[in-house]
Amino acid sequence: MTAWGVLLPTFDPLRTGAGFPVAEGARLAEAAGFDSVWVGDHLKCPAPVLDATICLGAAAAVTERVTLGFSVMLLGLRQSAWAAKQIATLQHLSAGRLALGVGVGGEFPQEYAAAEVPLAGRGARLDEALEHLPTLLAGGGEPMLEPPAPMPPLLVGGRSDRALERAARFADAWLPMWISPRTLAQRSERLAELAAARGRRAPRLSLLVLAHVGDDAASAREQAAAHLQGQYGMALEQVERWSAIGTDAAVSDFLAPYAQVGVSEILLLPMGSAPLEQIGRLAAVTQALRSTGQAAAEATGVRSGGTT
């Protein structure tokens, strides 16, 4: 059964200046039945954005059940010991509910300049950080960090061959975005081969999807286009075919094939000027998809003579 997550409103892509209802969004998502809440991680990008680690700390303080995740932490942009301290702290504050998504970043070179970190070599830095992170979290190595904390489940983002190799080497899950169900299924076969060559179990499939539920297709598309331009500096036409935009039925129809190809968790990034409203509307869509999936699973069990 597919799990469902939602990204919290840590960006202000439309520059409304209306604030960042992170804690309220986390409470709403948990009450609405989402399995997880997530935050993006940028130092500087086209939109105003809050610090990811502090936002997850705020979410931890107001929730009890949901997983709390980075989607994704730019680990190679940080000094490894400081990143390990932040991750360990979140593990303690959340009672072990953290999920660590990581990626190389690079789409906004200005944040590397702001951090005084070279843009070149960011992939190699990420790999090196991932090699040492479990030891740092366990309180080993130099510097010896205390208190220790368990390594959270690791999700590796990206669609490239290098990202796939990194996921096969390190990850519990692969977390791409902007990819079709058919391509995702094909790439998952390659991922399994790469993992098997390393003697590892194939990472599960996760997916990040940009989404907006509207009363009609035109208004939904307008909201999504403004959000995408403000947050990523991109035109909607570039990624529309991989985005869940439209009425409740249209968004449901878009998401269903991903669950059918074996995606274990789908993370939804609500787009538009009313993120809390979108969390509620997306929750209704995902609950309907859960019910449909459960009914299908029970029917399959009955037909096969199994128990449900």
Image (cartoon, helix red, strand yellow):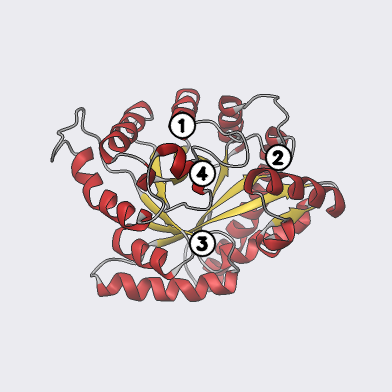
- Which mark is drawn over residue 263? 3
Mark 2 or mark 4: whose residue is earlier in sequence: 4
Question: Can you tell which mark lies on residue 56?
Answer: 1
**Residue 17 or residue 297, whichever sits in front:** 17
Label 1: how many residues lie within 10 Å, few (<14), some (14-19) or many (20+)? Answer: many
- SS label for mark 4: helix
Q: Which residue is mark 2?
A: 278
* Amino acid beneath label 4: Gln
Can see residue 126?
Answer: yes
Q: Quadrant of residue 300?
A: bottom right
Which of disc 3 and disc 4 is earlier in sequence?
4
Callout 4: 10 Å neighbours few (<14), some, many (20+)? some
Crowd around label 2: few <14 · some 14–19 · many ≥20 (10 Å): many
Q: CA distance from mark 4 to mark 3?
A: 33 Å
Residue 23, image quadrant: top right
143, 210: nearer the viewer = 143
Residue 263 rendering spot, x and y as whole percentages = 51, 61
Q: Assign a secondary structure to mark 2.
A: helix
Q: Please report whichever mark, 4 or 1, sits nearer to the chain's N-terminal start.
A: 1
Q: What amino acid is labelled 2 in the image? A: Gln
Q: Nearer the viewer, residue 254 or 194?
A: 194
Residue holding disc 4: 110
Q: Secondary structure at mark 3?
A: strand
